[in-house]
Image (spheres, rainbow, N blue to C red):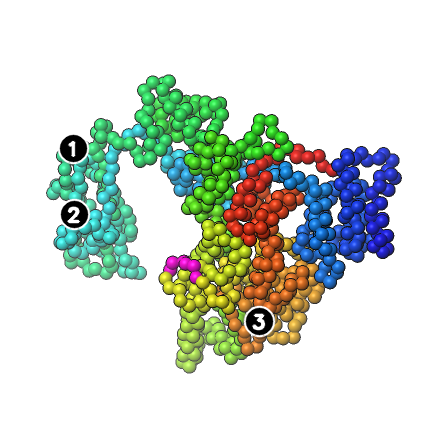
Amino acid sequence: MNRAVATGVLIGCIPLVARAAEQPEPTSPSLSQRADAFRQQVAPLLAKYCFDCHGQGTVTAQVTFDRFTSDRQLLGSRDLWWKALKQLRAGLMPPLGEPHPAADEIARLEDWIKTAVFEFDPQNPDPGHVTVRRLNRVEYRNTVRDLIGVEYNTSGEFPADDTGYGFDNIGEVLTLSPLLLEKYLTAAEAIVKQAVQTVSGVTPEKKIPGRAFRRADDQESDKPGRGAVSLPYYVPATLAAKHTAEHAGRYEITVHVSAHEKFVDGVFDYNKCRLLFLVDGQELGRQEFSRQEGKSFSFTYGQSWSAGQHDLTFELQPLTPDEQQTRSLSLRVDDVMVRGPLEAEYRIRPAGYERFFPRDVPATETERREYAVEILNRFATRAFRRPPETESVERLVNLARTVAEQPGQTFEIGIARAITAILASPRFLFRAETPEDATPPAHPWVDEYSLATRLSYFLWSTMPDDELFRLAAEHKLRQNLTAQIDRMLTDPRSKEFIRHFTGQWLQARDIDSVPINAFAVLTGDQKPDPEAQQRRARFRALRNRPLESLTPEEKAELDAGLAAFRAGTRRFRQYELNGDLRRAMREETEMLFAHILRGDRSVLELIECNYTFLNERLAKHYGIDGVEGNEMRLVELASDSPRGGVLTQGTVLAVTSNPDRTSPVKRGLFILDNLMGMPPPPPPPNIPPLEDAAKQLAERSPSLRQQLELHRSQALCNSCHNRLDPLGLALEDFNALGMLRENRPDRTIDTSGALLTGESFTNIRELKHILATGRRRDFYRCLTEKLLIYALGRGLGYYDVGTVDQIVERLDGSNGRASVLISAIIESAPFQKCRAEPARSEP
């Protein structure tokens, strides 16, 4: 069937099917108009460019465009048209070598898909549905810190959050299991116990650290020491410090000391000593010590003091001068705690009391209730991120009153119990949102409290601050949005956005734990040495034999092999990804993103730039000279450097590698998924491993390129690897440690390749330039989608295509300025609005 006939069949097929039906399918005018537009504008283009593979009885990749049985099926196949749109924009369809539609034809196809199938209205875009989101571990920790002043260890106390679409703040996967709910209840109790004082007055306390005690013979006794002084059991010694009592009264003095020894296996030290504690020359206590093996001790004494300065003294007396010293036994004064005066009139407010109780507790029941309403309403407003209903506050006040009226309880204990209930409430744990209007249209604005919450968790990963709350309460946040975005991005809390977005989008946080075997990576890059392999085999054979069976010559040979092994280990140790190096790599990625964001530079510099951020350790690892010191700083790169941009940073190079070698497949997938927005489909089952290809090659040590060429020669592997391999192989100049490697005498590194869209390159610098120029809109779209997912906490659907396109247009028109991207995300309909279900009737 030729294209002209095919066009006629496709244009006429839907009306014929409708007429053949016993009961004609009812269609609305809008449905018919959209279908007519397809037959007039789109069907001829599909017949011209697509039918050879996707029509006329040919079904490729389970896609065909001429089997729609009705207008409703045509316009309801949104997943199909979304897939077609992605392939068209990426230039992957029609395939390279086949006729491609002109720019105006592509625009016509895009416009019909967005308006007719996706029903995109530029004036009123569908904001999509956002699932009510639970705070993830990071958000919970930061919110508790800002709300109540407690640094709670969520990583240790809560299970890891699930991820979706590459991020751990997605509402659909942040479920709440019974076990997690129980942990939230336990956390609320622990946080309140630590933060909320339950009594209005406490006895004053002052800790005198051990380092404040000086030896009697120290000429600089007025200067505190750097650390606690150790007193050996074997030598008489005196330590002294002074304490000033502000008031006369009864005091309680608690001494904390610990006994220590340097252990020698099988040897015991039977020496003993006596420790005396004196106040103003009067002995209050004496204790004897022997081998105590690191135990700690505390002793409490009562004392009546006058106001003024008092002397505190420790005296150590050896008790066994004739006993042999076989170890090193010592006592250490850790600290002395002075509590007092103990009389009630000298009690003071506990630390942090005013945070929750700004005034004294009133005497009358009516005033106490009003005070409770004030406290709990203020706290619940911040915890719930909006003013609570009067009924909610009343329930909290009644809970606090019920607890406070029980025997032995206080007003503060009642408030603490109510605050515990607030922290365990779904309104604190989940981010619920409210439309601006009581009777909203299909796509209403979220109210300004919801907008403040969206802003703060997007840019700070925590609750709104006082200024955001104030603007929301005054209904002035939207009109001051630009100023607030600027303020929030310059605030130190924006480091959370930088850390967690780059950490997940670019997988930078995985550098902390990715396993890389430096020895295997570096030896794998070396030319095979048969003699060295023989020496290693000989060394292993000798090491596995009993030592007594070796001749003197063999023992000497074993010692030489052991010395060579240790020397090799020391040589490779400098290249290991230790904690400092991994931290520097992660900071390099974060600092590049922060530099572009806060300097309002082009986001294309994430792909291609002439600078990076290094300290001496990372620069040495990269082979870059002239960087000294541990501080990370901006370093301009040489004009011929392959570095610059995230692709050649240690984070990306290491996390996209295997433990013992590079992985062009992982690296190619990273580029397609995170920079171009064109991830291939998941691999089909029963894919043969890459190593099987190496076994078929006659060469002893085939290159990865040769293995991949044979691997993708199999039909099952070809379609994906044709997209992945050229991109990943462009990074083969870098090993799994992120270091540049050189050609070996027996092997040349070939980094050349071509995209499926035809652009060719010879190295990573040329590939980066292609991505940052000719394929920049792919990157803009990919980055916009990733950032929108992170900001909204949901995956994107067909209804978001128009919004993404609008943002990409703004971004491209500004040459990729970071401020334009952030503002466009925040000003977009999905960020500013919500969907009143159902959004529309389905065709």
Where does residue 415 sit, x and y in percent of width and height?
Answer: 39, 28
The residue that disc 3 covers is 749
Could you tell me how many numbered marks the image carries? 3
Query: On the rendered structure, is 297 left or right of 774?
Result: left
Quarter of image, res 806:
top right
Tell which of 802 and 252 is nearer to you: 802
Disc 2 versus disc 1: distance between alpha carbons? 22 Å
Contact check, label 2 and label 1, Cβ < 8 Å: no
Q: Residue at x 36, y 31 (%)?
A: 356
Query: On the rendered structure, is 394 left or right of 262?
Result: right
Q: Is residue 387 magenta?
A: no
Where does residue 684 sit, x and y in percent of width and height?
Answer: 68, 56
In the displayed structure, 158 sits above or below 721; it is: above
State the mark number for residue 240.
Answer: 2
Secondary structure, mark 2, is strand
Query: On the rendered structure, is 229 left or right of 196?
Result: left
**What's under tag 3, amino acid-wise?**
Ile
Where does residue 272 sit, x and y in percent of width and height?
Answer: 20, 52
Q: What segment is highlighted magenta in the picture? A: 630-635
- Depth check, mark 3 against mark 2: the one in front is 3
- Rate crowding at label 3 as few (under 14), some (14 to 19) or many (20 or more) other CA atoms within 10 Å: some
